[in-house]
Image (tube, grey):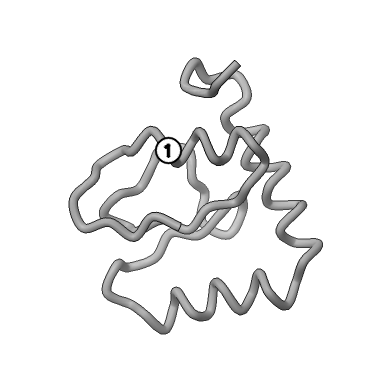
Amino acid sequence: ILISLSEGSPRCVPEYMSYSFPVIVSSVATASVVEDGINGFIIDPYDQDKLVDCLQYFASFHKRIDEMGRRAYEQVKNKSIIPS
């Protein structure tokens, strides 16, 4: 989860995705690799209810975490930003 008000494209987002983790990022600090609802969620940094909804979604749909995580990995696997 990276709900930032100022970071434009943080390196940690694709790095976490390279470990098959879906991410939740703010619409302000969106990494270009995040596709909302596909490999993570992009939310308004001031929308606390949406953050809670995303967390509840992951808590309720465990298999969806794996599916989104696989998509996250596929999105960044050929990028030079992931660790070797």
Q: Is residue 19 above or below residue 65?
A: above
Horizontal and vertical percent for residue 9? 31, 38
Q: Residue at x 33, y 77 (%)?
A: 47
Q: Nearer the viewer, residue 34 or 22?
A: 22
Q: Is residue 38 above or below residue 71?
A: below
Horizontal and vertical percent for residue 10? 33, 38
Q: Nearer the viewer, residue 1 or 30?
A: 1
Q: Residue at x 18, y 51 (%)?
A: 6
Q: Where, by quadrant of the figure, is residue 56 drawn?
A: bottom right
The three-letter code of the residue at mark 1 reads Cys
SS of the residue under disc 1: helix
Say how many tags the image has: 1
Horizontal and vertical percent for residue 30? 35, 48
Quarter of the image containing the C terminus? top right
- Left or right of 82 on screen, residue 44: left
Q: Residue at x 73, y 77 (%)?
A: 60
Farthest left residue?
6
Assess disc 1: are there few (<14), some (14-19) or many (≥20) residues with their C-alpha within 10 Å of its C-alpha: few
Q: Where, by quadrant of the figure, is residue 64 drawn?
A: bottom right
Q: Is residue 70 above or below residue 50?
A: above
Dot 1 corresponds to which residue? 12
Quarter of the image containing the N terminus? bottom left
- Left or right of 8 on screen, residue 2: right
Q: Is residue 78 above or below residue 27?
A: above
- Left or right of 32 on screen, residue 65: right
Q: Where, by quadrant of the figure, is residue 3 drawn?
A: bottom left
Farthest right residue?
63
Q: Residue at x 53, y 23 (%)?
A: 82
- Left or right of 32 on screen, residue 53: right
Horizontal and vertical percent for residue 83? 55, 21
